[in-house]
Each structure stands twice: as C-alpha cells, then as structure tokens.
Amino acid sequence: MKKHNFSAGPCILPKSVMQKASEAVLDFDNGLSLLEISHRSKPFVDVMEKARSLVLELLGLEGKGYKALFLQGGASSQFLMVALNLLEKRAGYLNTGTWSAKAIKEAKIYDDIYEVGTSEAAGFNYIPKGYDIPEDYDYFHCTSNNTIFGTQMKSFPDCPIPMVCDMSSDIFSRTLDFSKFDLIYAGAQKNMGPAGTTLVVVKEDILGKVSRKIPSMMDYKVHISKGSMFNTPPVFPVYVSMLNLEWLKNLGGIKAIAEENDKKARLIYSEIDLNPLFKGYAVKEDRSQMNATFTLENENLKDTFEAMLKEAGINGLNGHRSVGGYRASMYNALSLDSVKALVEVMSELESKA
Ligand code: PLP
C-alpha cells in the first residue's frame, strides 16, 4: 500500500533520491562506499562544491557576494553561532514561536536582545506585523516558517540592518527575493536532506565586525576559508542534499515546486475551512504552506478518524507534543496525491459523522 508521509521530519525525500543515496552507500567510487572514501578525495570534494553551488544557483544568489556552507550541529547551533559572529551590542528578534524563542535564549548569553514583536500571548497563532527595527542594532533575526504552530511569514521587512533568517522548515519551498537576507540558515532535514548537516548561506561582507574572539568551529570566516571542509564534513547528508538539489533543479527549480506547494496548501486548507469537523489553528493570512495545523472539533470521532488514516496509509499526522491536534507537514517531496488522500479521509469522516 502507498504510504503518505505527513511527518514533520526528519528527512522527507523523493524516492529517486533515496534510491541513488542507497546505491552510493554500497558503491560510490570504483567499488568503494561513499562512507569510506576520503572526504579530501576529488570525488567527495566535487560533491561538496556541487552542493554549495547548487544552493546559490537555486536561491538566485550566484555572484552576489554569498557563500554556502554545510555545517554540523543542527539549526540549534546556529542560534548561538549567529550571535557569536554578528552580535556586538544589541540585536532585534521577532518571536514567532518555539524556535524563535530558542534562538533568543541562546543569543542572550552573548549580549542584549530586544524582541521587536511577539505573538506569544495568542499561542503563536499569527505573525506580528507593524514592528520597528532600530537602525543602530547589529542585526534583525526572524523565523520564516513556524514548524510547530503552523504559521509562515508571507512578507519580510525592508530591513535597515543585516537580516538573518531561520528557514529550516521552508527553505527551497517558495520563491522569495533571497538577496533581502544577509544570512540564511536551515537544518537539512525538512526540504533538503538527511539530518546531520545544516545549511548556512551568508553574505561575506557582514562578517568580521565583532570584537570578540570566536572559536574556530564557530567562526563562519574559518569555514568559508576552508571551502566548508574545516573539519570532516558529514559526507552522507551533504551527498544526499546534493542529489535532492539536483532533483529540484531538474524539476524546474524553486518556481516549479512552489506551484505544487501552493496547490497542496490550497487543497488542505479548503477542506479544513469547509468541513465543520475541523478547525485550523493559525489565523488564515499567516497559514503555513509547509505545516498545516488543525484540530478535530469532536473528540468522540478521534479513534474513528485515526483508524481511517491508518487504513489509507497516512502517517505522521500527529501535532507537535506542545500543541496537540494534527499537523500535516507538506514538504517538497510530499505529492499532491498524498494531500488528496488525506482530504478524502477528512471528507469521508464528515459523511460518517
Ligand atoms: N528552527 C526551526 C524552524 C525548526 O523547525 C527546527 C526543527 O524542527 C529547528 C530550528 C531546530 O533544528 P535542529 O534540530 O536541526 O537543531
């Protein structure tokens, strides 16, 4: 039976990418596994270089002063690495949920942080708007997609200072003017590749401006100077990310996947709005195209609904433990057919109720 994987991660990838990845584990270079060849050998250095250049190409950032890095430590390490590299006196953070709050907590270790806006009082079900970003701050930090609560920034401010964005859960999913951002980071494991590598795209000219000493592993400039190979890179996640970025390029790039993602989101949200059994969590204008969060209004139908989901091969729909309800994560590799299968179950439940 076909499985429909709505899980929030880690690692939702097209089957063709999984297939090539598994072949490389067995034989990547003349009978040797990708996992056993030297990361300094030409075949792997070529992989790293290709992955880095595909990132800039797909984001439309080639020749614009940006460098792409594949680091380790997850997006969570970027919470502190951003502050170490950029925070001198004060930074402004937009607090749109759990991940923004964690980024704020880590940055506070190093210096003063000002929350330019927050939707905490409303359970993070919307994106604050109309906030000011002081011109004399070091940088502004935001989270483009709130994976847990299911909200997404539809527009970004014209920022008078460097703009840093955590795009962990919607990178490569929609067309944006990525040159508005000075630093983008994303854990691989939603729209790029297996957990274990973190993408950082940074405009070089914002670096080198803080007075503190930065440990080498935490210093973007060190990683740039070593071609993202300062220490042993996570070879498998980088290789699979490269395969997935190639898949995306062959599909027509971000523009093509964005159209698919648009269709998927319209389908699920129209069912949530039309079906009286379900209620969306996020306010309509800020709804995430990647993570649709909703609740079943009648708790008595929970077991029936979940049995029907299982029967239809639908997996991973449970909401995050901090929110409850349901969350349909619709990353790039999830097909429109999978969303159709979910919507069918939801409307069938209505006809049974
Ligand atoms: N930021 C966002 C928006 C996320 O969704 C997540 C994880 O889901 C993280 C950060 C943390 O990423 P990691 O587990 O790679 O540290």
Image (spheres, rainbow, N blue to C red):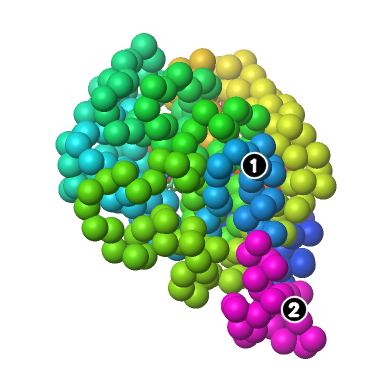
Sequence-earlier tag: 1 or 2? 2
Looking at the image, residue 255 lies above or below residue 58: above
Q: Is residue 48 magenta?
A: yes
The mark closer to the camera, 1 or 2, is: 1
Q: Where does the magenta region start and end?
A: 23-49
Tell me the residue at 61%/23% (across/down). Answer: 269
When asked about the image quadrant of residue 25, the answer is: bottom right
- Tell me which residue sits at (27%, 42%) in the image: 87
Q: Residue beneath label 1, please? A: 63
Q: Position of residue 78 (x, y in %)?
A: 38, 51
The residue drawn where x is 77% and y is 34% is 256
* As drawn, 42 above or below 112: below
Kindly identify which numbered label has been placed on residue 83: none
Q: Is residue 238 visible?
A: yes
| SS category of the residue bearing label 2 | loop
Q: Is residue 61 above or below residue 266?
A: below
